[in-house]
Amino acid sequence: MNHANSFPATLHDIGTKLNTDSQAEWKISVISGLTYSLSPSDLKQYLKSQGYDKVLGRHYFTGTTPTFNLFNVDTNPKPLTLAEKQAEMKAPQSDTQGPYGAVEWLYLVDDAVPSKSQGGIDTVYRVETAAGSPPATCEGRPQYFEIKYTAQYWIYGPK
């Protein structure tokens, strides 16, 4: 499977609201599955109703390198990281599996020395995934196809 032609994923800020939400512990474990099940218009309405509609940026691939571009964060320079996988674990069965299973949970770090990143991001975790695993084979599929998934990306800077 090649991610080079993938569409950018929108990164919404859920953390700011969850920091003060007494239901946060419960919401963290269900929000990815819930948002995966919603239509685009229902998703937009849900995000707005919860105060999660602030877009921080996009996640996409630069070649085959996972890239996180937080162009809506009010800092200079804007946070941007090109990451590499340090570790992965199979998504728990409690994650929404989708048609082919849930994508792995990941631990990603800045990919190079010297760093190609800017604006303070050095670590990204992908957790609470919903669907996204590819089929066992691409046989019989069009050259380009999309596999929908949702996940939480927890993004950190240096300690």
Image (spheres, grey):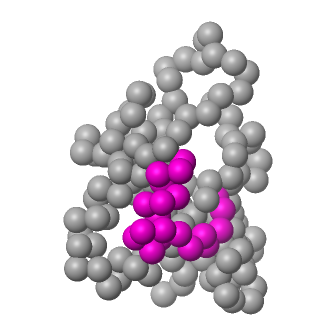
Q: Is residue 127 magenta?
A: no
On the image, the x and y values in percent for residue 106 come to 46, 54
Q: Residue at x 66, y 62 (%)?
A: 58
Side of 156 where 77 appears, left or right: right
Residue 111, picture quadrant: bottom right
Q: Residue at x 62, y 54 (%)?
A: 9
Residue 16, picture quadrant: bottom left
On the image, the x and y values in percent for residue 101 come to 39, 33
Side of 45 where 27 appears, left or right: left
Residue 99, picture quadrant: top left
109 over 140 or under it: above or below? below
The span picked out in magenta is 40-59
Whether residue 55 is visible here, answered yes or no, is yes
On the image, the x and y values in percent for residue 80 come to 69, 72
Q: Is residue 43 magenta?
A: yes
Side of 109 where 106 appears, left or right: left
Whether residue 113 is visible here, answered yes or no, is no
Q: Residue at x 48, y 87 (%)?
A: 159
Q: In this view, which residue lies farthest toward the top? A: 140
On the image, the x and y values in percent for residue 124 come to 52, 66
4 over 137 or under it: above or below? below
Q: Residue at x 74, y 89 (%)?
A: 76
